[in-house]
Image (tube, rainbow, N blue to C red):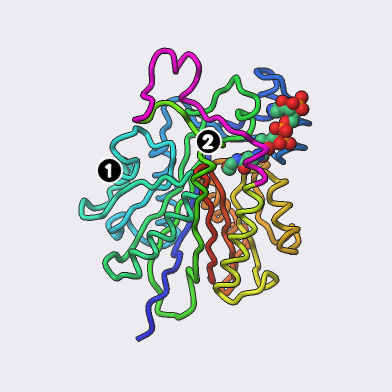
């Protein structure tokens, strides 16, 4: 018997109601809609309500994905949450989502932190665990409440990020050569200091001084990250195409990590694929890190941008510096 294909059975997403426009940010830091839009393509982002947690957002996205798949929480035996903003450092956000959603206590539940590449890492992990035959149905969620770790006085980062969630349900299909065809994951650990949160971990626990200096917030050397992002995403995309013997022009839709429209544009030029083949929603959500690809994937499916037999390429890059690509046949 040929090995079972691991396939996406359903998708769902959630974005908080509150919209923060570039103009609104220009009231609090020295910036402008013109600067933000021309450098990033971002027009607005969603910000979670006070008290709204990552697990709250993840639960709604997961419920929508389960409904799309025609499944119930009771069917899930594996729950992976890609996030770098869990509700608490411990326990895992996955356990809060399990409890709120009613996923059985026999399900394996854990978080995975690969920053903005987290969803691609989690998808690969879930598919490997499912294709081993030891798990049957997985929920893979990417969720971030980045508003909790943004320095709202730092104009070089606060204009870039937003909150949101995306979810997928993974199972198997007997149709060969379908679903996840391959992945290519990697990391440049030497770039860890280009994008980081310095305090609040075991190396430097939070102190009154670190809070006053807002060292529990994201810091980034944007220009260096930009260059590495383009290089790594281009390589990850090329490698996966080569590995799967697929030409770039056979890809119906690329779902790139939504960090910056200029990065997406550069990848489009390197791959010689027109921008129409790239799904873009960075204008409406900004960079939602691990939520970015599953949120875009869900919007792409629900707006008819993905059809059966289409080839979709996901490609991501983030703190670590991690990167990853995944190729899917629907
Ligand atoms: O999720 C994965 C990780 N993140 C990324 O992928 C982000 C990658 N990097 C980027 O997207 C871009 O580097 C940024 C959007 C962050 C910055 O764009 P840039 O074209 O690289 O600008 P820059 O950092 O070189 O800054 C240019 C100027 C600077 O002023 P001076 O030194 O030329 O006088 C900045 O101080 O723009 C200034 N600046 C701003 N001005 C108005 C920086 N942020 C702002 C701002 N508003 N928000």
Relative horizontal placement of residue 87, taking residue 290 as reference (left or right)? left
Distance from disc 2 to disc 1, alpha carbons, whole Å, reads 35 Å
Residue at 50% over, 34% down: 196
| C-beta proximity under 8 Å, tags 2 and 1 | no
Residue at 49% over, 68% down: 182
Identify which residue, 198 or 112, lies in the foreground: 198
Range drawn in magenta: 202-227
Splitting the image into four quadrants, where does ligand 1 fall? top right
Q: Is residue 36 visible?
A: no
Residue 215 part of the magenta-drawn span:
yes
Q: Is residue 186 visible?
A: yes
In the picture, the quarter occupied by the N terminus is: bottom left
Task: Provide the residue designation for mark 1.
Answer: 99
Relative horizontal placement of residue 17, taking residue 252 as reference (left or right)? left
Residue 193: assigned label = 2
- Provide residue 36's location: percent of width, then percent of height: 72, 33
**SS at circle 1:** helix
In the displayed structure, 118 sits above or below 204; it is below
- The residue sitting at the front extreme is 190
**SS at circle 2:** helix
- Provide residue 12's location: percent of width, then percent of height: 48, 52
Identify which residue, 268 or 72, lies in the foreground: 268
Residue at 67% over, 30% down: 21
In the displayed structure, 29 sits above or below 270; it is above
Residue at 30% over, 46% down: 98
**Which circle's residue, 2 or 1, is located before the other in the chain?**
1
Category of crowding for the residue at label 1, using alpha-carbon neighbours closer than 10 angstroms: few (below 14), some (14–19), many (at least 20): few
- Closer to viewer: mark 2 or mark 1: 2
The reply to whether the residue tagged 1 has its Cβ within 8 angstroms of ligand 1 is: no
């Amino acid at each position: 018997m040929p090995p079972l294909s691991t396939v996406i059975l359903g998708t769902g997403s959630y974005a908080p109601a509150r919209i923060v426009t570039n103009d609104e940010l220009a009231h609090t830091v020295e910036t402008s809609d013109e600067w933000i839009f021309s450098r990033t393509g971002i027009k607005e982002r969603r910000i979670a309500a006070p008290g709204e947690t990552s697990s709250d957002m993840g639960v709604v996205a997961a419920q929508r994905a389960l409904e799309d798949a025609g499944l119930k929480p009771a069917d899930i035996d594996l729950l992976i949450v890609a996030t770098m903003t869990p509700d608490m450092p411990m326990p895992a956000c996955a356990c809060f989502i399990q409890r709120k959603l009613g996923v059985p206590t026999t399900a394996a539940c854990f978080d995975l932190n690969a920053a903005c590449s987290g969803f691609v890492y989690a998808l690969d992990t879930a598919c490997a665990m499912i294709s081993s035959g030891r798990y049957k149905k997985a929920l893979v969620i990417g969720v971030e409440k980045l508003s909790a770790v943004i320095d709202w006085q730092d104009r070089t980062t606060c204009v870039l990020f937003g909150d949101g969630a995306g979810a997928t349900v993974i199972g198997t299909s007997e149709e060969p050569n379908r679903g996840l065809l391959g992945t290519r994951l990697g990391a440049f650990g030497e770039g860890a200091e280009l994008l980081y949160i310095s305090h609040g971990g075991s190396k430097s626990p939070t102190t009154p001084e670190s809070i006053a200096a807002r060292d529990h917030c994201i810091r980034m050397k944007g220009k260096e990250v930009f260059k590495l992002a383009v290089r790594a995403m281009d390589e990850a995309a090329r490698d996966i195409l080569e590995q799967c013997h697929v030409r770039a022009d056979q890809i119906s839709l690329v779902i790139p990590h939504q960090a910056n429209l200029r990065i997406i544009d550069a990848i489009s030029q390197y791959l010689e694929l027109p921008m129409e083949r790239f799904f873009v929603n960075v204008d409406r959500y900004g960079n939602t890190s691990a939520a970015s690809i599953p949120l875009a994937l869900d919007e792409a499916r629900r707006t008819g941008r993905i059809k059966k037999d289409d080839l979709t390429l996901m490609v991501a890059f983030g703190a670590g510096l991690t990167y990853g690509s995944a190729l899917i046949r629907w």
